[in-house]
Amino acid sequence: MRNWCCTATSSARRFAAVLPLAGTLLLAGCTNLFFYPMRQQVLDPQEMGLAKRDVALRAADGVQLFAWHLQAQRPRGVVCFFHGNAENISTHIVNVAWLPEAGYDVLLVDYRGYGASQGKATFPEVFDDVRAGLDWCLARGHEAGVPVFALGQSLGAALLLEAVAADPYRDELAAVVADSGFSSYRRIARDALSGSWLLWPLQYPLSWLVTGKHAPEQAVRRLGELPLLVMHSKDDEVVPYAHGLRIFAAAGSSRCFLATRGPHNAALGPRGPQREAARGALLAFLAEAAGARASGRPAACAAPLLDQPPD
């Protein structure tokens, strides 16, 4: 069996490495450098003791996508999971492998060009991949009679917020979780450029070559009353903490914030320094959102979740 704990932050390291490289190529206006896919499978859910089945999805343009359905014995909900920009679901699985034991089915979707999914990841087509995953999860939730939640990490959070902001998802989902997300593609490119002494003077003019569309801080304004949990680590070395604060500040009234610690994308994984607290807070949020939806009342934020911007 592979030592799956060691893969928890590997994609974060790749994201950190590829962003400065992207800075040298921004003159080409290549927003697609946000994608860093891997075909190789690293971890097998069954070797991790998880019940899973392979799922074939089809995007709106006909591209075949690959996903894993992790099955809980008695599901109380379905979590639709969208990973970050590097590798594929076989490494990001460590961040959600604990959810079936907690009573949640999980669908992990590989975008086009990632893992066993066909095609090549490009904007805006990748949003169709997110929608295909959401459609499957909503159908599964309807079949099982349980609420459906969506969780995105890093790039996955950015893609998810834009997709959910459109009908019908904001009305049909019970809640959305954005973990380690960036507030805009242009701003995260600027942050990457500012880390290079060579490109620092050009960070503003070069960042304008990255798309200003689909910014998560704009998308959250269109979520309405859909409960939103924003999670972000104060120690994030890839997507600075300020990005999470910007997303939270732009969101509507039904919002909660969880400040975490540790590397990028690691709060819920096996190497998260406060993983049990972060997992407990997430489970409490999901339960509260489900209860609020069932009773028709607004969802509330219970400690350690905050309903106001943190200091």
Image: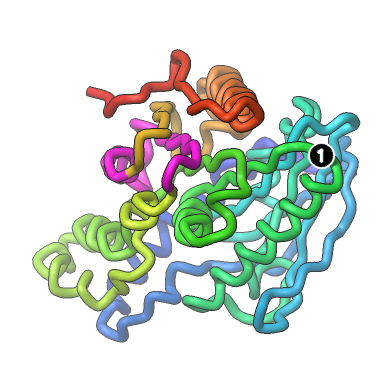
Answer whether residue 33 is visible to the viewer in this image. yes
Q: Residue at x 37, y 48 (%)?
A: 238
Q: In the image, residue 270 lies at what x, y percent?
A: 63, 30
Q: Residue at x 56, y 72 (%)?
A: 126
Quarter of the image where one finds residue 42: bottom right
Q: Is residue 30 above or below residue 305?
A: below
* Image side of residue 25 versus residue 274, left or right: left
Question: Which secondary structure, mark 1?
Answer: loop
The residue furthest front is 296
Quarter of the picture containing the C terminus is top left
* Image side of residue 204 versus residue 13, left or right: left
Q: Residue at x 83, y 45 (%)?
A: 45
Q: Is residue 253 above or below residue 219?
A: above
Q: Residue at x 70, y 69 (%)?
A: 39
Inspect the magenta stretch and tell me whether residue 239 lies in it: yes
Report the residue marked by disc 1. Answer: 145
Q: In the image, residue 274 lies at what x, y percent?
A: 52, 21
Kind of residue at badge 1: Gly
The stretch of residues the image draws in magenta is 224-250
Q: In the image, residue 64 lies at what x, y percent?
A: 75, 76
The residue furthest bottom is 28
Quarter of the image where one finds residue 93: top right
Crowd tier of the residue under label 1, counting other residues whose Cα lies within 10 Å: few below 14, some 14–19, many 20 or above: few
Q: In the image, residue 26 lies at what x, y percent?
A: 29, 77
The residue furthest top is 303
* Image side of residue 309 versus residue 297, left or right: left
Answer whether residue 13 is visible to the viewer in this image. no
